Image: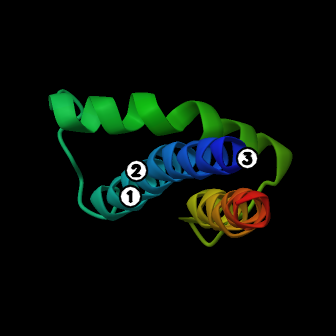
């Protein structure tokens, strides 16, 4: 059973890495939106291309725009933290019981 436990540790680690990276991409995009970035900059284009699909869905589902402040990145970051706390930790706990 230790093989399955090790497999679950690997799955949890691999799942945690893109969640953390995507959270940082959203944070960087939110910070860049405060200064008027050049829309033709490749980094800005990447940030918009990587985050717009998910942020658009959140904005459509929860219109959280109060006083010109968009709260959809906060909702997405909270969702990522929930996934890291619930899903990744559950996989790690399950792997510990199988070892």
Q: Secondary structure at mark 1?
A: helix
**Residue at screen point 24% across, 61% down:** 35
Give the residue furthest to the right.
61
Percent x, y for residue 78? Answer: 66, 67
Q: Hey, which quadrant is residue 88 in on the image? A: bottom right
Horizontal placement of 20 versus 58: left or right? left
Give the residue furthest to the front.
1
Gap in angstroms between the C-alphas marked 2 and 3: 19 Å
Say which of marks 3 and 1 sits in front.
Answer: 1
Say which of marks 2 and 3 sits in front.
Answer: 2
Per the image, the residue denoted by label 2 is 21
Q: Secondary structure at mark 2?
A: helix
Q: Secondary structure at mark 3?
A: helix
Q: Which mark is residue 24?
A: 1
Gap in angstroms between the C-alphas marked 1 and 2: 5 Å
Task: Give the class, few, some or many, for how many residues have Cα within 10 Å of label 1's Cα (few <14, many ≥20).
Answer: few
Horizontal placement of 10 versus 43: left or right? right
Per the image, the residue denoted by label 3 is 58
In the displayed structure, 53 sits above or below 29; it is: above
**Residue at screen point 79% across, 66% down:** 97
Say which of marks 1 and 2 sits in front.
Answer: 2
**Residue at screen point 53% across, 53% down:** 16
Percent x, y for residue 53? Answer: 59, 30
The answer to whether mark 1 and mark 2 are in CB contact below 8 A is yes
């Amino acid at each position: 059973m230790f093989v399955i436990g090790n497999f679950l540790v690997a799955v949890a680690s691999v799942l945690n890495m893109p969640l953390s990276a995507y959270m940082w991409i959203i944070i960087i995009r939110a910070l860049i939106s405060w200064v008027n970035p050049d829309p033709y900059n490749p980094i800005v284009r990447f940030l918009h291309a990587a985050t717009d699909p998910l942020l658009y869905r959140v904005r459509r589902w929860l219109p959280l725009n109060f006083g010109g402040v968009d709260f959809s990145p906060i909702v997405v970051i909270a969702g990522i933290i929930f996934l890291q706390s619930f899903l990744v930790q559950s996989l790690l706990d399950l792997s510990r019981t199988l070892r």
